[in-house]
């Protein structure tokens, strides 16, 4: 009798140790394919970001993992549980904070949390203790008797997170968590998520279209039109560009691109009405370009690579152009 292959044993071990495994996941809305066979793995205790423009596929992926949409093709496994085959078990393992508000504004903070606790079979001293713990940890204990309608956007978001954590899920799913938050409230939310990962070992999956927010994640999958176009840590992705990024504004990008290619043996990337060049020692090329084309260059900028530069390099178009095209 032949036993299981070493590769099969390795796959089983990966399934048991990973917080989330997505493999060849596809989803279609009538004629439009929102996800085109994507795959990635999230480690336990990792803050993993799904970065992409609206229409890129990240919200569809979020809904599939949260069991809000049925899986049409491919597989998703959360903490060893197949999402398609056992959605009830998956729901007990996740906490979900949606982009749209889910609090009852006419109830107090404590009343909202008590109702949520009842949905998970929590009552009495156990529920009260957990609510007190979360209100203190999220800095809203002094607002427990205030109606939610009276809270600022940042405080409401904290209560939303508390609500999703009541049943102590090992995986927290956050859909655009900074929506409507000012920079200070956004900073506070991310400080808490970092502590949650550090102190409780919670795995956090975040969807976002904000570059700054994505830069706080341990690793990122960048999505565009249903495909993962880049995967890695924020630093790895930025370093994959190499050198500096020059962006050139000109009245005639086609002519200038041809001239740069002829004179400097560099082929600029055309992005809308601008030209983009990746280059080591970019400041030297900037000097030479301005000297060679003083009247044809309207403006030129030099910067270290950003996550948006990664998106442009992998897709050939700007981040916000993808949203306009949908």
Image: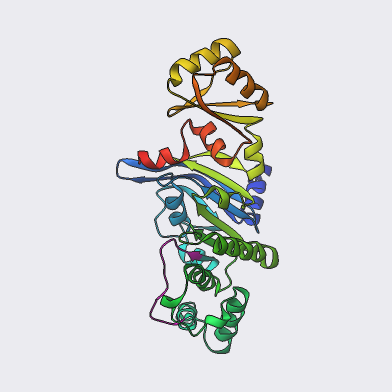
101 within the magenta span: yes
Q: State the residue lying farthest toward the bottom.
A: 124
Q: Quadrant of the N terminus?
A: top right
Q: Identify the residue at horizontal 54%, vertical 31% (top origin).
A: 313
Q: Is residue 42 above or below residue 319?
A: below
Task: Identify which residue, 306 or 16, lies in the foreground.
Answer: 306
Q: Pinpoint residue 64: horizontal percent, then vertical percent.
A: 44, 55
Task: Identify which residue, 282 or 65, lies in the foreground.
Answer: 282
Q: Pinpoint residue 275: horizontal percent, then vertical percent.
A: 50, 25
Task: Identify which residue, 75 or 302, lies in the foreground.
Answer: 302
**Residue 263 in view in this figure:** yes
Q: Which SS does the magenta portion mostly show?
A: loop
Task: Identify which residue, 205 or 275, lies in the foreground.
Answer: 275
Q: Pinpoint residue 93: horizontal percent, then vertical percent.
A: 55, 66
Q: Identify the residue at horizontal 57%, vertical 68% (top origin).
A: 169
The part of the chain drawn in magenta is 96-108
98 within the magenta span: yes
Q: Quadrant of the C terminus?
A: top left
Judged left or right of residue 311, residue 238 is: right
């Amino acid at each position: 009798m032949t036993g299981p292959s070493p590769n099969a044993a390795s796959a089983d071990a990966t399934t048991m140790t990973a917080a989330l495994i997505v493999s060849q996941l596809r989803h279609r809305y009538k004629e439009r394919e929102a996800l085109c066979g994507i795959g990635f793995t999230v480690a336990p205790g990792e803050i993993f970001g799904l970065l992409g423009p609206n229409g890129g596929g990240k919200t569809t992926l979020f809904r599939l993992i949260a069991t809000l949409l049925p899986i049409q093709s491919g597989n998703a496994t959360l903490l060893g549980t197949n999402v398609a085959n056992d959605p009830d078990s998956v729901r007990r393992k996740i906490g979900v904070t949606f982009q749209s508000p889910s609090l009852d504004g006419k109830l107090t903070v404590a009343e909202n949390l008590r109702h949520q606790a009842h949905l998970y079979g929590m009552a009495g001293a156990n529920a009260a203790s957990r609510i007190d713990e979360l209100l203190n940890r999220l800095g809203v204990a002094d607002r427990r008797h205030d109606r939610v309608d009276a809270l600022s956007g940042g405080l409401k978001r904290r209560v939303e997170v508390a609500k999703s954590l009541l049943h102590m899920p090992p995986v927290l799913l956050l859909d655009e968590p900074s929506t409507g938050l000012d920079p200070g409230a956004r900073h506070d939310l991310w400080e808490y998520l970092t502590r949650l990962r550090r102190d409780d070992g919670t795995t956090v999956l975040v969807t976002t279209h904000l570059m700054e927010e994505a830069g706080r994640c341990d690793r990122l999958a960048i999505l565009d039109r249903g495909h993962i176009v880049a995967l890695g840590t924020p630093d790895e992705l930025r370093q994959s560009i190499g050198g500096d990024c020059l962006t050139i504004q000109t009245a005639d990008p086609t002519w200038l691109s041809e001239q740069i290619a002829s004179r400097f043996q560099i082929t600029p990337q055309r992005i809308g009405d601008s030209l983009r060049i990746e280059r080591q020692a970019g400041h030297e090329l900037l000097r030479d370009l301005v000297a060679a084309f003083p009247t044809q260059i309207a403006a030129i900028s030099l910067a270290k690579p950003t996550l948006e530069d990664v998106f442009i390099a992998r897709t050939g178009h700007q981040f916000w152009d993808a949203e306009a095209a949908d």
